[in-house]
Image: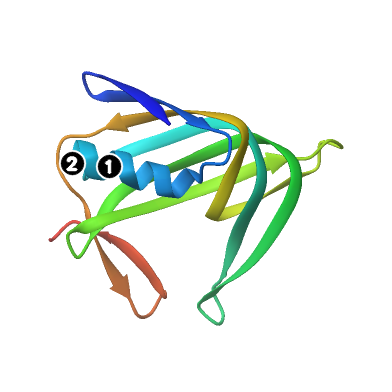
Amino acid sequence: MDYRKMQNKIVVRLDKGEEILEELVKICEKEKIKLANVNALGAIREFTVGLFETQNKKYESTTYNGDFEIVSLTGNVTTKDGEIYIHIHLAAADKENKVYGGHLNKAIISATCEMFIDVIEGKVERTFDKEIGLNLFDFEK
């Protein structure tokens, strides 16, 4: 991984074999990022995405292996209990242009990933909502 910081923007290159979420956390820790918007594209060889089932309030995840292009990777950085909290969604296409996606749990780079992090001044904390079953934005904290 390598990156450059330009004012409130960070441009990142992730390399073959690296895991997207792990590398994003490393950058956020090093740069002390508490709030940001994230987007990226690139190529991955393995990824796990989930779908939140609202009835039973849990994620069902699926892992895919092969050659995939990141069609869209978008999400945000916030905090929960003062710690970095990453929330990313991914859509990736196979060689037949079939797209698979959902809440990103893991993604391993096969070639490269080009990521842009738009750092926002401030902080948004998350709090677990029992009724919904998710960690939601809490603007009161």
Q: Which element is circle 1 on? A: helix
| Residue at screen point 62% across, 57% down | 48
Task: Specify whether residue 69 is in view.
Answer: yes
| Residue at screen point 41% across, 52% down | 87
Whole-percent x and y of residue 90? 58, 45
| Residue at screen point 43% across, 31% down | 1
Residue 8 sits in quarter: top left
The image quadrant where one finds the C terminus is bottom left
Residue 27 sits in quarter: top left
Task: Specify whether residue 35 is in view.
Answer: no
30 relative position to 108: left or right: left
Whole-percent x and y of residue 103? 54, 56
Residues at badges 2 and 1 in contact (C-beta under 8 Å)? yes
Q: Which mark is residue 28?
A: 1
Residue 10 sits in quarter: top left
Q: What amino acid type is highlighted by mark number 1?
A: Cys
38 relative position to 34: left or right: right
The residue that label 2 is drawn on is 32
Q: What amino acid type is highlighted by mark number 2?
A: Lys
Q: How is the image coloured?
A: rainbow
9 relative position to 141: left or right: right
Crowd band around label 1 with a 10 angstrom C-alpha radius: few (<14), some (14–19), many (20+): some
